Amino acid sequence: MRARWKLVLAVLAVLTLLAAGCGGDDDGDETAAEDSTTTSTTEAAEEETTTTTAAEGEEEGEEVVRADADLVIWADDTRTPVIQPFVEQFGEENDLTVAVQELGFDDIRDRLTVAGPAGEGPDIIIGAHDWLGQLVTSGVVAPVDLGDRAEEFNPVAIDAFTYDGQLYGLPYAVENVALIRNTDLVPEAPATFEELAQTALDLKAEGQVDVPLAVQEDPGDPFHNYPLFTALGGYVFGRGDDGSYDPTDLGIDSEGGLAAAEAFAQWADQGLISSETTYDVMIESFGSGRAPFAITGPWAITQEDTGFAATGVPYVVEPIPPVAGGEPKPFVGVQGFMVSAQAENPLAAQTFLVDFMANEEAQVALFEAGGRPPALTAAFEQVSDDPDIAGFQAAGANGEPLPAIPEMGSVWSAWTDAYQLVLTGQGDPRQAFTDAADQIRTLIEEGE
C-alpha cells in the first residue's frame, strides 16, 4: 500500500498541472465501455487487478473504446509484454484494475485525439516525442511532473519531451540511425562517404553484393536520408536564439538542401541507393551478407528472426563518415510515456510513471525488448558496454532532435515525394526540392 499515500501526496501537484494547462476538462463520465476488454492478446493476467486487451475496433479502423479498468494504458505489441509485470505490480499494490490495450504504434496518436475528448481514451500512452506538437495543440496530453528526478535523465530526452517550457512525457529511450558495416566485406571503416561509396560500388561490380548501400527509400525517406542531407548543408527548420525550431525558416530549399538534392540524384544514378530498397529489402540484403553497408536504427538489429543479431551477419555500428567534408547529423527521436489530458485517473497515471517506469529495472527491460538506448542515465550506464549501443550513441552524438512542432506534420509528404522524384530521375532535383518547399510553406500557412 505504499503508493496510496503517494497518490494523496501527488494530488496537489497533478491538480496544479491540470489547472495550468492542458485544457482538457475531464468531467468525464465513467464511460468505460462494457465489452471493451474481451480479447486477451498476451499471456493472461490472472490477477484481478490487471488485464491486457486488444483495443476494440482497432483492426477495423473504427473508434477505439477505453478498456474497463481504473487505469488504462495504450501500447503497441512490442512494449505491452514488457510493461505487463510492472502494471500488475502497480495494480496489486494500489488495489486498482489496470488494463494494457494493444494498438498499432502508428495509430496511437490519432486514436487518442479522437477517443480522449470522447471519454473513451486511455490514461497513459506510449509514443514518440515528435507527436507532441499535434497532441499538445489538440489538448489531449497533460504535463508530467518528474520533479528533481528529471535530472536523472539524458538532457536531450527531457528537452525532446518539453514543449513551450513544459514537460509532457516520461522518456524511456533515445534513438537515431547509424552506419552498419559488414566487417567481412569491409574490414576497415571508410574515412569518408566518398570512400564508402566507391567501396560499395566496387563490391557490386565484382558481384559480391546486390545492394551497395542499404537505406530504405520506399518511397524516398527524409528520416533515413537526414544525416546525408545535413552533411551537405541542408536542414529542415532553423532555430531561434533559445534553440527552439523556427517554422518560418524552412531549409529544404536552402543552398545546402539543394546541393543535397543533386547529390541524392547522383547517388541514385550511380546505383549506390535506390527507390526500390524497401525496409524489407534493406534488412534482408544486409542480414544475408549481400549489402556491405546499411543506414538504419537499432530496431533493425534487434528484430526477431530477421534482425542482424539474429541472422549472425558480422557487423559493427558506427557513425556515418563525413560527406564532402560535412558532418552527418541524424534525427534523434525519443520515446516515452504521456498522460492523457482526459485521463480518468491522472493521479494513478502520474504515480505509475514516476514510481515504476522511471526506474532502472523498467528502462532496462524496455531496452532489452527494443534495443533502443535507455533515457534514464543509470539504466544507460548498465548497458553502455554493449558495442551496438556505443555505436549508436557515437553516431547520434551530434544529432538533432526531431522537431516536435506542429508544422513538422506539413513536411513529410511533400519532402518524401521530392525524394521519390529525385531517386527515380524525374526532372531536375533542385526544382523538385524547391517545389516541395513551396508546398510545405503553403501547408504551414494554411495550418495543415
Image (spheres, helix red, strand yellow):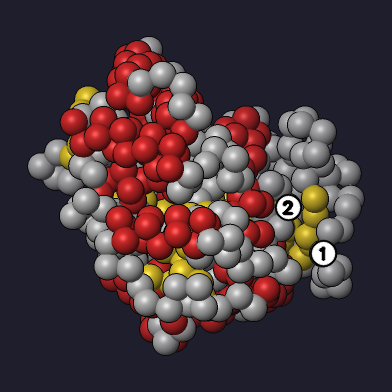
The numbered disc on residue 102 is: 2
Q: Position of residue 363 (x, y in %)?
A: 51, 74
Q: Where is residue 227 in the image (x, y as percent from the top left)?
A: 33, 51
Give the crowd class for mark 1: few <14, some 14-19, many >=20 residues within 10 Å: some
| Quadrant in which residue 200 is drawn | bottom left
Q: Residue at x 54, y 38 (%)?
A: 275
Q: Which numbered disc, 2 or 1, marks the residue that appears first in the sequence?
A: 1
428 sits to left or right of 324: right
Residue under numbered circle 1:
42
Give the secondary structure at mark 1. loop
Q: Residue at x 35, y 26 (%)?
A: 429
Q: Do the residues labelled 2 and 1 touch (CB within 8 Å)?
A: yes
357 sits to left or right of 402: right
- Most extreme residue toward the front is 206
| Quadrant in which residue 116 is drawn | top right
Give the secondary structure at mark 2. strand
74 sits to left or right of 221: right
The numbered disc on residue 294 is: none
